[in-house]
């Protein structure tokens, strides 16, 4: 029995500010492409079915579960992963706040939370606690009980240079 | 956070909140977890699992899969040695090698849904998954034993034909009850005769999963020279090494376990699952093989906490003093014995002084995956019954629940039901902390709508913890920074809490200790990261190593000052000469002089601690609001008080308390294994096995109580586990307060609450 | 004389007695002396293959602390000895 090889997709996208090109099986998830093809293992797999948020990345600024996105769908898109959150040589205020608030224990959920929280802060730099809890409800953390994560996001908000304060919206 | 401290000694580092040493790697996405392992020539594997909970394996035909392009190796149990029925004494755990082997790959029978029957290694994961479909397994399906009632019924199908049960020391053949243990003190019947009020409740609990976000993984390379290296995320690198040696029948020294960063464990990552399969596949194909478990398999085939039936009866006299109590604890171990009935029996009445008590524990095998430790293993389920009974008693006799607990609290010198007396413990202090909290003194306030009702509940909890073996090596660099090598896997900030204890002794900053967690070839034996032992026991090893460094540094200072070592003082990080004023060197300065005073300093601290020093008590208080039209429960306010002995890094102590409470809230309200008559779990995903999210829980207010542990130089107690014990009964008690009905079955999901309200209305 | 607390499964050897006073300066001597008074009990307290060890899964708590010396554990005249299942902390089997 021979199977005709399925053509691989040629994907061109922007990843953490850099142009990248890669070949991916048609059915490969973006998560698998990031981890296995592009060697970006900061994005984590917790469930592979869209229910934990460990694999959260942004695509054109919107948060997605990369396990639910097919790699070929990333063609022409702008992606950001945990590896792109920090400025060169330093930490994003969220990362600093996560460290200072002890917002991680095992740390497996941390990349997903940071990517999701950064997307929130970029949209709503003055989100209140309720809004933060709403926004992060798609990310599971089993270690912390969430409180220190929420505190960390509030702290990062307070410490980031704020061009304009904005009221938080509703979900 | 507020703190109650018994001032004993002044600390400089312990009790502060430095940034954890591995923090940068973890917030930058650089930390390498089990699934992140990359090796030259790495190939991928997949596991074929039984779709039946109970089935004889008639035949496995792997010929087609073996010939498929890209497939490098196929294995079944036939490729594993028949592990001798020896008992593997792994220090704190005892493992029967035959069961351990059978559990990772079925030989004659599949005894749980998801039981591995074959595995494949191939050039990539998809090729391996495709190859699984080419394996032909013929099963003879047998009747599964799914519930405790089924397992104990006369004539029940047997999970293991050859299991010999132990009924309080008597052998029993042809049974599913692997063990029946009993503890008894005093005369319970006489005690009940003295009681003026007696309450008895039977509670039912579902099995619940640890829910760590990182699935199990294992990567193995079995080299031609016989050396096996395993990269895995485990709580027990040495335990895994020893278990692998037993299952593969290899010498322990031929195996090296490299612990990767671990994405949560809570007790669920102590045993071996994929490691032996990856090892055998690697031996067969000569390449490193990686296996990553799918989430469905994590639910189906790893070990959650046991469910069970717990009946507790307690009597009090007219002053509210407990006169007698009995407990009957039946846990479903899963397919192999070991449902933690012993710790359950030790913990069930631990919070109370009871002169007359009897505890019966039953370890029952059923056709579900073998249960594992889950945070204070065995204690939450048993304590659920005790603490709800206590709450009912308080209501009947009209006594404040905190007063009742203070009146009956176990204290130093009181005997646990299994015999030993408690040393200094903080049981009274945690109840007092709750009693003194703003939350306790606050008013509950009116419900947010007429259909809603509010209630408040309190519960106590205990976990004993363990001591055991740890090794730490400290080397002094000439810039005054020390490197600290340890074997304790860091799940929640223990690099920091251990480094801080060394820093305290050395008089340097926490940042000036650089901790590394290393593999089993690179450090002396270190027991598992579990049993609330790591900060306590590995911390003690670090203190010991650091004290040796100080002694040697004193010798060096003596050399430098040409004085007697006995004249060298060390205080607050400064060495000084008692007989020559002005001769002072900081730790850092003296480190720079090591080269000229004999060379490097490197020390090793080895400990084998005989127990935990009494364990850690907790008391929790919760306010709930229940929607009587939907049965939905909202947690309005939650306060947890726990005895930490001495909190080394208070933020991570709070983190353990908060995380434990939230896991308990999940177990109380939502989490359960929904298992069909066929023994198949019907909700094996994070969508249907609903763990709390950010929206489901409020801030957990924490009160760290510090009653020093006499067995630790700084008074530290292990605190990781107790936090999961009180939440379920606290919430049941709050619901009782709100609704006037007693929920005795977990989880207390909306349907059950509505049913209880309906029954209440009907009666 | 050390006091030995007899766990339930062993009480049939002691005629139901929950505690017994047994002379001995080490755990081994106590076990030997127990055997004299209560024949059969020793087989439950000593490893089949290694006469220095307790059977797997059993631990001896001496004055509140688990022994790490097995039957070689020295005892004080007023020591309190419990033979109990080894508590597996967060650990479990298999
Ligand atoms: S791995 Fe994508 S949501 Fe869980
Ligand atoms: S820190 Fe472990 S899952 Fe969030």
Image: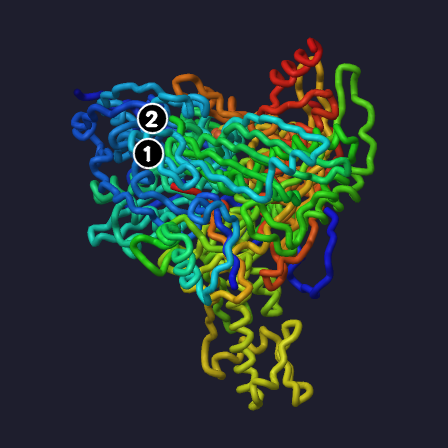
Does B288 sit left or right of B392 as displayed? left
Q: Tell me if residue B638 comes above or below residue C91 in the rendering.
A: above
- Point out residue B753 in the picture as x, y percentages from the top left corner: 65, 18
Pointers 2 and 1 in contact (CB under 8 A)? yes
- Badge 1: chain ID: B
Quarter holding residue B621: top right
For the point 44% across and 65% down, the residue is C26
For the point 42% across and 31% down, the residue is B364
Return the residue found at the far top. B762
- The local secondary structure at tag 1 comes to loop
Pick whichever of labels 2 and 1 is earlier in the sequence: 2
- Badge 2: chain ID: B
- Point out residue B427 in the picture as x, y percentages from the top left corner: 68, 47
Residue B163 badge: 1
Residue B158 badge: 2
Neighbor class of circle 2 (other Cα within 10 Å; few <14, some 14-19, many 20+) is: many
Q: Tell me if residue A55 comes above or below residue B704 in the rendering.
A: above
Quarter holding residue A72: top left
**Between marks 2 and 1, how big is the CA–CA gap?**
9 Å
Q: Is mark 1 within 8 Å of ligand 2?
A: no
Quarter of the figure that contains the C terminus of chain B: top right
């Amino acid at each position: 029995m021979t199977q005709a090889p399925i053509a691989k997709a040629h994907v061109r996208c922007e990843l953490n500010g850099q142009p990248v090109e890669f070949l991916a099986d048609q059915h490969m998830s973006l998560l698998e492409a990031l981890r296995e093809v592009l060697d970006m293992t900061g994005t984590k797999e917790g469930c592979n079915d869209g229910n934990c948020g460990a694999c959260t990345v942004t695509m054109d600024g919107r948060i997605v579960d990369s396990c639910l996105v097919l790699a070929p769908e990333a063609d022409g898109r702008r992606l950001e992963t945990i590896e792109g959150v920090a400025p060169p040589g330093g930490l994003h205020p969220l990362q600093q706040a996560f460290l200072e608030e002890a917002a991680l224990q095992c740390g497996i959920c941390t990349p997903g939370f940071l990517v999701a929280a950064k997307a929130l802060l970029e949209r709503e730099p003055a989100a209140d606690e309720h809004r933060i809890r709403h926004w992060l409800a798609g990310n599971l953390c089993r270690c912390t009980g969430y409180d220190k994560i929420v505190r960390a996001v509030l702290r990062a908000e307070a410490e980031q240079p704020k061009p304009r304060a904005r009221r938080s919206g509703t979900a | 956070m507020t703190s109650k401290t018994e001032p004993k000694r002044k600390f400089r580092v312990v009790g502060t909140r430095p940034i954890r040493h591995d923090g940068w790697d973890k917030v930058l996405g650089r930390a390498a977890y089990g699934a992140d392992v990359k090796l030259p020539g790495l190939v991928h594997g997949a596991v074929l699992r039984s779709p039946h909970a109970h089935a004889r394996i008639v035949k496995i035909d792997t010929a087609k899969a073996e010939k498929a392009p890209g497939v490098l190796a196929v294995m079944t149990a036939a490729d594993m040695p028949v592990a001798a029925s020896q008992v593997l004494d792994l220090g704190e755990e005892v493992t029967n090698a035959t069961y351990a082997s059978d559990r990772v790959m079925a030989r004659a029978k599949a005894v749980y849904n998801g039981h591995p029957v074959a595995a494949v290694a191939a050039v990539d994961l998809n090729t391996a998954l495709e190859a699984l479909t080419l394996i032909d397994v013929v099963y003879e399906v047998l009747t599964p034993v799914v519930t405790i009632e089924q397992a104990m019924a006369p004539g029940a199908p047997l999970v293991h034909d050859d299991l010999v049960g132990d009924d309080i020391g008597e052998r029993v053949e042809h049974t599913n009850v692997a063990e029946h243990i009993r503890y008894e003190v005093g005369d319970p019947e006489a005690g009940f005769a003295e009681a003026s009020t007696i309450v008895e409740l039977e509670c039912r609990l579902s099995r619940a999963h640890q829910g760590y976000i990182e699935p199990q993984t294992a990567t193995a390379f079995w080299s031609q020279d016989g050396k096996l290296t395993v990269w895995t995320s485990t709580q027990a690198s040495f335990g895994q090494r020893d278990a692998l040696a037993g299952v593969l029948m290899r010498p322990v020294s031929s195996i090296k376990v490299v612990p990767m960063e671990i994405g949560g464990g809570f007790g669920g990552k102590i045993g071996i699952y994929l490691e032996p399969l990856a090892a055998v596949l690697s031996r067969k194909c000569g390449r490193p093989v990686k296996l990553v478990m799918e989430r469905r398999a994590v639910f189906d085939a790893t070990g959650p906490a046991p469910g069970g039936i717990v009946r507790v009866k307690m009597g009090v006299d007219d002053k509210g003093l407990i006169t007698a109590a009995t407990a009957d604890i039946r846990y479903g171990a899963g397919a192999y014995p070991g449902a933690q009935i012993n710790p359950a029996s030790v913990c069930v009445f631990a919070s109370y002084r009871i002169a007359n008590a009897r505890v019966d524990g039953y370890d029952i095998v059923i056709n579900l995956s073998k249960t594992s430790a889950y945070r204070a293993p065995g204690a939450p389920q048993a304590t659920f019954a005790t603490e709800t009974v206590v709450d009912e008693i308080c209501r009947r006799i009209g006594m404040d629940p905190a007063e009742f607990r203070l009146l009956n609290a176990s204290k130093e010198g009181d005997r646990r039901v299994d015999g030993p007396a408690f040393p200094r413990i903080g049981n009274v202090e945690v109840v007092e902390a709750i009693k003194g909290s703003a939350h306790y003194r606050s008013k509950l306030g009116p419900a947010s709508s007429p259909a809603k009702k509010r209630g408040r509940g309190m519960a106590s909890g205990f976990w004993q913890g363990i001591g055991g073996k740890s090794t730490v090596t400290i080397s002094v660099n000439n810039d005054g920074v020390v490197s600290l090598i340890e074997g304790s896997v860091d799940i929640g900030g223990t690099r920091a809490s251990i480094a801080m204890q060394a820093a305290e002794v050395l008089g340097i900053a926490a940042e000036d200790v650089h901790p590394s967690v290393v593999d089993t070839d690179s450090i002396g034996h270190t027991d598992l990261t579990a049993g609330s032992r790591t900060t306590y026991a590995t911390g003690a090893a670090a203190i010991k190593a650091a004290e040796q460094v100080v002694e040697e540094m004193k010798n060096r200072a003596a050399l430098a000052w040409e004085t007697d070592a006995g004249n060298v003082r060390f205080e607050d990080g400064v060495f000084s000469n008692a007989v020559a004023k002005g001769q002072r060197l900081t730790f850092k300065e003296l480190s720079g002089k090591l080269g000229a005073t004999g060379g490097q300093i490197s020390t090793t601290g080895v400990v084998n601690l005989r127990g935990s020093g009494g364990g850690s008590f907790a008391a929790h208080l919760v306010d709930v609001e229940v929607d009587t039209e939907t049965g939905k429960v909202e947690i309005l306010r939650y306060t947890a008080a726990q005895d930490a002995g001495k909190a080394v890094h208070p933020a991570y102590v709070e983190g353990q308390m908060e995380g434990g409470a939230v896991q308990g809230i999940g177990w109380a309200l939502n989490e359960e294994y929904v298992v069909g008559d066929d023994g198949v779990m019907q909700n094996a995903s994070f969508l249907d096995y609903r763990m709390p999210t950010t929206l489901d829980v409020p801030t957990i207010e924490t009160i760290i109580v510090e009653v020093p542990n006499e067995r630790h130089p700084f008074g530290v107690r292990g605190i990781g586990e107790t936090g999961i014990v009180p939440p379920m009964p606290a919430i049941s008690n709050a619901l009782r307060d709100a609704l006037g009905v007693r929920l005795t079955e977990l989880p207390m999901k909306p349907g059950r609450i509505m049913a209880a309200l309906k029954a209440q209305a009907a009666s | 004389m050390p006091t030995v607390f007899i766990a339930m499964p062993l009480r049939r050897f002691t005629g139901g007695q929950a505690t017994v006073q047994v002379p001995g300066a080490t755990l081994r001597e106590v076990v030997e002396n127990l055997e004299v008074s209560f024949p059969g009990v020793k087989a439950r307290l000593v490893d089949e293959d290694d006469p220095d060890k307790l059977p797997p899964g059993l631990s001896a708590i001496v004055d509140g602390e688990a022994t790490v010396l097995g039957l070689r554990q020295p005892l004080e005249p007023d020591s309190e000895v419990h033979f109990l299942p080894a508590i597996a902390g967060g650990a479990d089997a298999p």
